[in-house]
Image: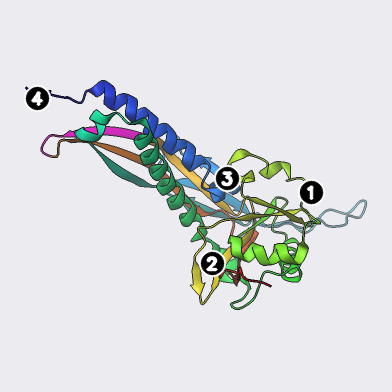
Amino acid sequence: MASVQTSTSGNLQNMSRIMLTSARYTEEHNAPMVGLIEKFNLKKGEYQLTIPKVGQMDAEDLVEGRDMIDSEDIDVSTVTATTAEVGLKVIITDTLLQQNNEDVFKIIGRQMGEAMARKKDTDIIALFPTLNGGTKLGNDNINLTLANASAIIANAKADQFGNDIYVVHHPNALWKLATDIGNTLATYPLPDAFNKPAVKDYWTGIKLSGVPFFEDGNIQTVTDNSGYGVIADKTAMGHLAARARREERDRDISLRAHEVVVTEDYAVFEVDDTRGAAIQYEIGNPTTTNA
């Protein structure tokens, strides 16, 4: 007589925990941009975030015994952001569940984590070209050399981007910079503002004029072999969370499987357009056959 195997809710719960733990770990370590921008949270009952921005004011020299004539305009503007749901669904068949293979569920969890991380990361990367009023630094067919890297930092500091400036670009763009620099700057410490697990693994070891350089392989080609990276302060862009990650399960009897759905409600947006700029440089693969 053939034996009968059944999948139980207990097995599903155990395997889902393994899968989702792996997914969370993977996501937290695969999205460098999320750790480089400002964080905001919506409170219960709120549907959007409104951030006021005050214009620059000027102080004046005073003369004893004379009243101040000029007054400064507050010049308040606001930035608003609303969130939207993002998620994915995984189908766990009864056969897979019966096998109770922990490694399989770790693999599924890794894939889920990579998907969520890539989605957030590419959402932020899509903001790069609109910073600085859409005016980018660099250009197509130009390499990120030491001279160009120093120039974009000078521009950022001259235009007062902020105090926590960083650069992010594709690994191939940063390879050119590394070949120009050599190992002379690799011993400099990472600034405290960026020295955390979510981002420090993506630090290239390069720091120029106090500005650290990070790599992000999710940056895509936009023209020929060039792509958009960014030089920005942490306050240039923001991540707004409305609802933390939610995991729900549903039984599909005809499919003989369980559906595991993971969703999150968030948004990424420009906080201050004047605190960052896209940087366009070549990201094509370097030759590996140098003599």
* CA separation in Å, label 2 and label 3: 19 Å
* CA separation in Å, label 4 and label 1: 65 Å
In the image, which is nearer the foreground, mark 1 or mark 2? 1
SS for dot 4:
loop
SS for dot 1:
loop
User: Which residue is identified by label 3?
Assistant: 35
Mark 2 near mark 4, Cβ–Cβ under 8 Å?
no
- Looking at marks 3 and 4 on the same chain, the residue that comes earlier in the sequence is marked by 4
* Few, some or many residues within 10 Å of mark 4 (<14, 14–19, 20+): few
SS for dot 2:
helix
Left or right: 125 with respect to 193?
left
Q: Is residue 154 visible?
A: no
Q: Is residue 158 above or below residue 164?
A: below
* Few, some or many residues within 10 Å of mark 1 (<14, 14–19, 20+): few
Magenta-colored span: 246-254
Mark 1 near mark 2, Cβ–Cβ under 8 Å?
no
Residue at point 42%, 46% (across, down): 116
- Looking at marks 2 and 4 on the same chain, the residue that comes earlier in the sequence is marked by 4
* CA separation in Å, label 3 and label 4: 54 Å
- Looking at marks 2 and 3 on the same chain, the residue that comes earlier in the sequence is marked by 3
The kind of residue tagged 1 is: Thr
In the image, which is nearer the foreground, mark 3 or mark 4? 4
For the N terminus, the quadrant is top left
Mark 2 near mark 3, Cβ–Cβ under 8 Å?
no
Mark on residue 129?
2
37 vs 32, nearest the viewer: 32
286 vs 246, nearest the viewer: 286
